[in-house]
Amino acid sequence: MSATPAHDLLSAKVGQPWKKPPLIRRAWLRWILLIGGLVYFVLAMASMEVNWMRVWEGLDRGRQFVLAFTDPDFTSRATDIREGLIESAIMTVTSTVVGIALSIPVALGAARNIAPLPIYLFCRGIVALSRALNEIIVAILLVAIFGFGPMAGFLTLSFATIGFMAKLLAEDIEDLDRSQAEAVRATGARWSQWINYGVQPQVMPRLIGLSMYRLDINFRESAVLGLVGAGGIGATLNTAFDRYEFDTAAAILIIIIAVVMALEYLSGIIRARVQ
Amino acid sequence: MPQVIAGDGTKIWMLRDRRSQFLRWGAWLVGTLLFLWCWQRISSATEWFFVLGAPEVAADIGSRAMPPRWSYMEKLWGPLWDTLNIATLGTVFALIMAVPVAFLAARNTTPSTLFIRPLALLIIVSTRSINSLIWALLLVAIIGPGIFAGMVAIAIRSVGFCAKLLYEAIEEIDTRQVEAITATGASRWQIMAYGIVPQIMPAFAGIAVFRWDINIRESTVLGLVGAGGIGLQLKGSLDTLAWPQVTLIIIVIFGTVILSEWVSARVRGAVI
């Protein structure tokens, strides 16, 4: 029996000290990536103008800010904080509900196994548009159109929710178990019955999980929309920073972190129960 | 739960029993009322006069925004380069900070579950739950406006995200490989380098590219609060009501985001 090439390869290695195999096997690619990365890094660092004097002066303010977390001021602007929080919460709830309600038809349209090609392309277009446009940019445009206030924030978050939910839900619908859907169709079900009894029960756990996740994201986002005048706690936070009231800003940030943690914990419990 | 209940001597199949049905109706009622109340609050905080006039305003802005001012493009290359740098360098520095945090947070590599792990988790949660725009706002107030503030904001924001995904990957590694390395009498660092790191390398590369893609999106708007990049141009154009420039900038941002998503998908496809 003659030695195979693999065997030759192995016997050539015997006695040699072991060397860690490289992450990228092709040597030229490895070197190009390494040198290119280094050149880019140097160029990027060179084009960044850092005013170290300003940074040094700012470090003192940074220390004040960090210290403010040990002594946050919840009281002196309590009404502003409360109003901002309620507005954020309201925007979160309404935009999540409306966004999910609108995303379900879009998701059905964006699933290739349900929708015909023209509808599929149209709905995928909606999803792509909603996902590619940053929430802040949408908020700026909507504030210009609808005026300041929570209305613009609500519309922004609803729009963003559609893209997020519809994409993930459509992927889930495309992965569904065909045999269940076909069994329902074989009973002579109408299209709406087919969706309701063949498709909906299969994607429901995922829909609930995603909804909870999106509620969490929408709250986080609603905290920044105020920066561009779209209502919520962001406006209060912005004012606090502008006045260098770091203790109030720290209080608001602590509240945001606490709410996000609570929502994440809650969504974890709910997702564990439905899945 | 499918349930059979007696009614008038006959047995009827029902999806849910009476109690859970009432509970469901109650939950729906509370939910609907909550939604209507919230909607009413938004409605009362809204100037409906403006909303009703919105189609005209939108049409007006649209007519003024078209066509985009293509000649403005030559002033956008610099900010675009800055935006790319903010995202890329921010991601690099975030990964450098995220690796130790992830190792301290993972249950199987942390030196102490009682003291150090909660601390690492606190870092992860607090950096993750605050938006990069808020970090940028804060850093602009502390270290002054500019690209540097934007980069630091992106870096801090990404630490939690990367560390969370990375420590989940570390917790899922194959323990047999680690045991095999341990059995050769390797030191703690050798176990790390030869037992753990090779296993999480693909996940690490995937996370890095994924976060870079997100950071490109986020860095396009950081300029709105003065942290450099193309957002600065956007803010300037918005403040001077130069709508044709706004259109061009939004088109450029759109293109950049789609390009970065394509690159990230290609790289992740190659890695995994």
Image (cartoon, coloured by chain):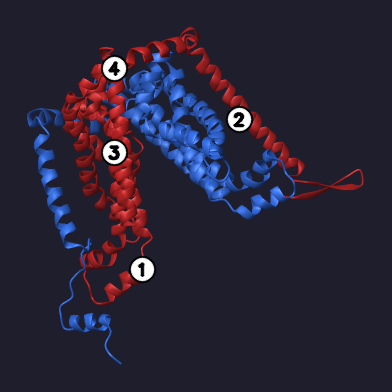
Chain colours: A blue, B red
Work out whether mark 3 precedes mark 4 in sequence or the reverse, and give the earlier one: 3
Residue denoted by label 2: B31
- The type of residue carrying mark 1 is Thr
Q: CA distance from mark 3 to mark 1?
A: 33 Å
- Spatial CA span between label 3 and label 2: 36 Å
Q: Where residue B244 is drawn, which disc sits there?
A: 4
Marked residue nearer the N-terminal end (1 or 2) = 2
**Would you say B54 lies left or right of B22 here?**
left
Mark 1 crowdedness (10 Å alpha carbons): few <14, some 14-19, many ≥20: few
What residue is at 34 percent from the left and 25 percent from the top? Answer: A137
Real-space Cα separation, disc 4 to disc 2, in angstroms = 44 Å
Dot 3 alpha-carbon crowd within 10 angstroms: few under 14, some 14 to 19, many 20 or more: many
From the viewer's perspective, is residue A61 above or below residue A16? above
Measuring from the top left, give residue A228's x and y in whole percent. 34, 20
Q: Please give the residue where the numbered disc 3 appears in the rendered image.
A: B215
Q: Give the residue number, with chain letter if any, for mark 1.
A: B175
Residue B116 visible at all:
no
Cα gap from disc 1 to disc 2, whole angstroms: 46 Å
